[in-house]
Image: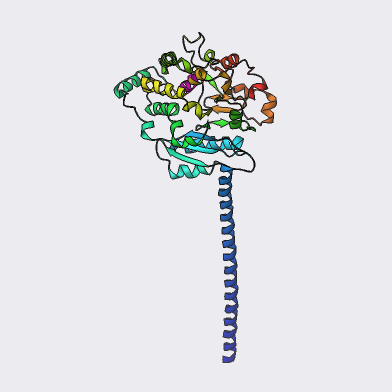
Amino acid sequence: MMFKSTQRLRFQAFFFTILMILLVHAYISYRRLYVLDSFNRWESLQAHQNDKTRLSSNDSDYKRENATFVSLARNSDIYSIAQSIQDVESRFNNKYHYDWVFFNDEPFTPEFIDYTSHLVSGRAFYETVPKEFWSYPKHINQTKAAEQRDAMVQKKIIYADSESYRHMCRFESGFFWQMPIMDNYRYYWRVEPDIHIYCDIEEDLFKVMAENQYKYGFTIAMYEFFETIPTLWTATMDFVKANPKYVHENNLLDFISDDHGKSYNLCHFWSNFEIADLDFWRSPEYREYFDHLDKQGGFFYERWGDAPVHSLAAALFLNRTEVKYFGQVGYSHPPYTNCPTDQGFHNSHRCTCNPGNSFTFEGYSCASKYFKVQGIDGNSYASYL
């Protein structure tokens, strides 16, 4: 009996020894697979990061222009700007991988940076706007500014009581291009939260700008609310009279005035979409023009927007051949949409917008006036090229 008991114990010991060997072997195999998988995932991530670095500098033989996207966004805009980025990337930038510069009057949160940086295919940069670019200049009487805001509220003018909106308009008019990071670029494409791109963009629009020597590009033109800029035209004409050398002889005056400059017809390019040459904003004529306007106080005593400021400058100081209508860009910023009407183009570029909803030929649009002044057929496919 004792012999059988001893034999049984030896067998159990042998069995457990074999079991332990198998378990150890299985564990070692598992660790090898885990480590290999982790290494592969790390290697894949590194390859992705290296690809982004290569794409941002020299991707194959394609030579990108010296250009970037620019977005002014708050941390609370994280998901609305994400939608915009996704549209731009899927319709355009996934082929070209241009940089993206983000501005905020407050530091970006780690969440915002992490989330958006994974959406862009080029490099992403995050910059905080300095106080001097987002505050009242010393010459502004803030009591008067507050009284004027209250008066505009009584008139039910949009953004009447918003101080941040006024700081934004002043920043976009005169300071975003003075941010040090922008010294690295020649061209920019402005992208705002909540926009949509509805058509595939096959050609590199930055190259279109550079190769054709365009200085300013837009998709939507409309009338401004007079109550927001009652003295802007007078201030502009005062500058023009003092600096006639800056007015181009082949300008677009007839786009912004119906009486040869006596008054402003309120037409302007909607600047939430604009592709432009930064050297234009850096030029003496624009710098001096902005400084002149800034001293008038209209950004705070009224509600001067960057759209009419940019538009008046482009219409007066540029050769009309340097302004480009990007009709092929199916685009919307609530509540207006630009949608190509040529059915062939609409189909070939997989547009998802309804041409019937395009703002281009609506009564409040200034596109028809622009087409007439430029001598182009806004309904033709050629106007998109």
Query: Is the N terminus in the top left, top right, bottom left or bottom right quadrant?
Result: bottom right
- Which residue is outermost to the bottom? 2
**Residue situated in front as seen by the camera: 205 or 338:** 205
Q: Which residues are magenta?
A: 307-312
**Residue situated in front as seen by the camera: 319 or 193:** 319
- Which residue is outermost to the left? 143
Q: Can the viewer see residue 295? A: yes
Residue 183, above or below 258: below
**Residue displayed at 57% across by 65% down:** 31
Query: Is the C terminus in the top left, top right, bottom left or bottom right quadrant?
Result: top right
Left/right of residue 350 with respect to residue 162 in the rendered view = right
Q: Position of residue 327 (x, y in %)?
A: 61, 24
Q: What predominant SS class does the magenta segment belong to? A: helix
Residue 184, above or below 223: below
Q: Can the viewer see residue 1? A: no
Q: Position of residue 121 (x, y in %)?
A: 57, 42
Q: Position of residue 350 (x, y in %)?
A: 66, 32
The answer to if 308 sits in the magenta stretch is yes
Q: Position of residue 38 (x, y in %)?
A: 56, 58
The answer to if 248 sits in the magenta stretch is no
